[in-house]
Amino acid sequence: MSSRYALALESVTKVYGSGRHAVTALNGVTMGVPHGTFIAIMGPSSSGKSTFLHCAAGLDKPTKGGVILGNTRLAGLHEEQLTEIRRERVGFVFQAYNLLDSLTVADNVGLPFRLAGAPIPADRVRAELANVGLADMGDRYPGQLSGGQRQRVAIARALITEPDVIFADEPTGALDTRTGKQVLQLLREVADKAGQTVVMVTHDPVAASHADSVTFLADGRLAGELIGPTPEKVADRMTRLGEW
């Protein structure tokens, strides 16, 4: 796999436990995600979706195989180096938002810089908030925002370091249909207009239909890919994963 991929997995296997208690969550997964694309990862419960995200984002280390982020191979890096990579080159958007209620919206967006011990660039914070439609919300606190607004703050925080890849874990799981659609359209724009790479784990066929392609997992293995997904095609493929 070459650097034409924003993210590449090479025969990634992840085993939890040992002996007869061992559970293989990922089993020999190899794939590449081109720069500037928006892909969705789908599969039934216990298919390996969360483990895929954790290994791909450097939150967990594969038992076998390797992960390459841009030109950087993650295997062999110590925890301090991985922390720096996650802070500077990876963005995260979670279902639970993971905002700090004691900080203003602007301070939440600038948090990656604070954690790095660097000055918070106020102009960039304002620009990212404007990009997600929250230009006048910087002085508010998360508790004063709706769920959709909080998720947009989380997306602004993920974007501010201009990461190689944005990982979104069920980003619409806590939102109503209309608000979820707005968040998905924003992620779509991140790939189309900003040229950044988005990897989204979801169980929702409608959410997955906003992606360029859907990669399916079953029992920790790749179970096919769907290009140009629609909700109907995704739902149909999901119902047939058992046949795979």
Image (cartoon, grey):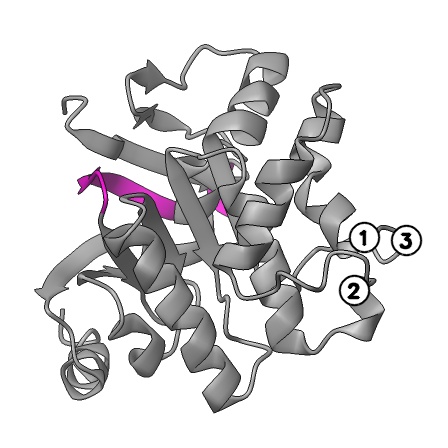
Tell me what residue is drawn at x 40 percent, y 16 percent. 75
Q: Position of residue 58 (x, y in %)?
A: 48, 31
Q: Are marks 3 and 1 in contact (CB under 8 Å)?
A: yes
In the rendered image, residue 86, in percent from the top left (x then y), is placed at: 54, 30
The mark that comes first in sequence, 2 or 1, is 1
Residue bearing mark 2: 142
Residue 201 position in % (x across, y down) = 40, 60
- Asked if the residues shown at circle 2 and circle 1 are in contact, with their CB atoms under 8 angstroms apart, the answer is yes
Residue 95 in sight in this render: no
Depth check, mark 2 against mark 1: the one in front is 2
Residue, disc 3:
102
Crowding at mark 2 (Cα within 10 Å: few <14, some 14-19, many 20+)? many
At horizontal 85% and vertical 58% (from top left) the residue drawn is: 101
Location of the C terminus (image quadrant)? bottom left
Most foreground residue, 181 or 69: 181
As helix, strand or loop, the secondary structure at mark 1 comes to loop
The answer to whether residue 199 of the structure is visible from this angle is yes
Using residue 130 as the reference point, say whether residue 44 is left or right of it. Answer: left
Say which mark, if any, is on residue 76: none
Residue at mark 1: 100
Residue drawn at point x = 56 percent, y = 13 percent:
81
Which secondary structure, mark 3? loop
Front in this rendered view, residue 63 or 142: 142
The residue segment tinted magenta is 19-36
